[in-house]
Image: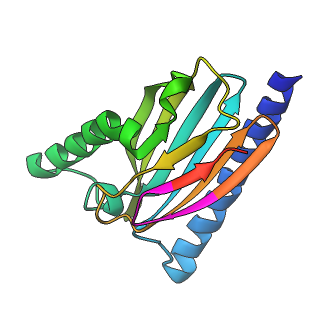
Amino acid sequence: MKSTIANIIFISLAITSTNTLAKEKHQHREHGAHSHGHADLSIAFDGLNGQIEFKSPAESVVGFEHVAKSDSDKNKVTKAINDFESKITTYVQFDSSLGCKIEKKSIDMVADGSHADFIAKFTLSCIKPVNGTALTFDFTGLKKLKDIDATVLAEELQLKAEIKSKKTKLEIK
């Protein structure tokens, strides 16, 4: 039953993301809307396992949005990817008693015309349930990132947090 619920949640997140992307693409064409300094973060659990997905305009993480052609730009993309992977446990901090492990699934800079997004996906496994603990977000090392909308799904809980340019704690209750 929990697995079915988690699958429904993941599917609804995918549909929401697809609808949001469609709206964003439409806005890009008509209004040029693109929120530099903003990111979306989703964390969803199915029992002790879960997934993390982070998405932001590439400019907010890499420093630019065009396709990397020069060696300098390619090095910046590689550095941003390596830094994000090595610092994910600083950006998203679970209570140490949970024994959570975060592993990279994929990290890419995906270009669409004149804009590009930085997308990072991770798998997550813990030895204890996260409910009843706190989750700390610390993206202060990403200076161009000013606002993150975070959604956390754990069991029957759906929590939201708005993370501004400071360390933020979210109670998972």
Residue shown at 51%/21% (left/top)?
A: 99
Magenta segment range? Answer: 161-168
Q: Is residue 164 magenta?
A: yes
| Residue 101 vertical position relative to residue 136 in the rendered view, above or below | above
Q: Viewed as shown, does residue 47 lie left or right of 2?
A: left
Q: Quadrant of the N terminus?
A: top right
Q: Viewed as shown, does residue 1 lie left or right of 30?
A: right
Percent x, y of residue 57: 41, 60
Secondary structure mostly seen in the magenta stretch? strand
Percent x, y of residue 109: 36, 47
Front residue (pair 30, 135):
135
Residue shown at 46%/72% (left/top)?
A: 35
Q: Viewed as shown, does residue 81 lie left or right of 38?
A: left
Residue shown at 51%/36% (left/top)?
A: 94
Q: Quadrant of the C terminus?
A: top right
Front residue (pair 80, 137):
137
Percent x, y of residue 24: 58, 66
Instruction: Give the farthest residue toward the right.
Output: 1
Q: Viewed as shown, does residue 106 lie left or right of 27?
A: left
Instruction: Give the farthest residue toward the top.
Output: 127
| Residue 128 vertical position relative to residue 12 in the rendered view, above or below | above
Residue shown at 33%/41% (left/top)?
A: 84
Quarter of the figure with residue 64: bottom left
| Residue 3 vertical position relative to residue 70 in the rendered view, above or below | above
Instruction: Give the farthest residue toward the bottom.
Output: 31
Q: Is residue 173 magenta?
A: no
Percent x, y of residue 142: 31, 57
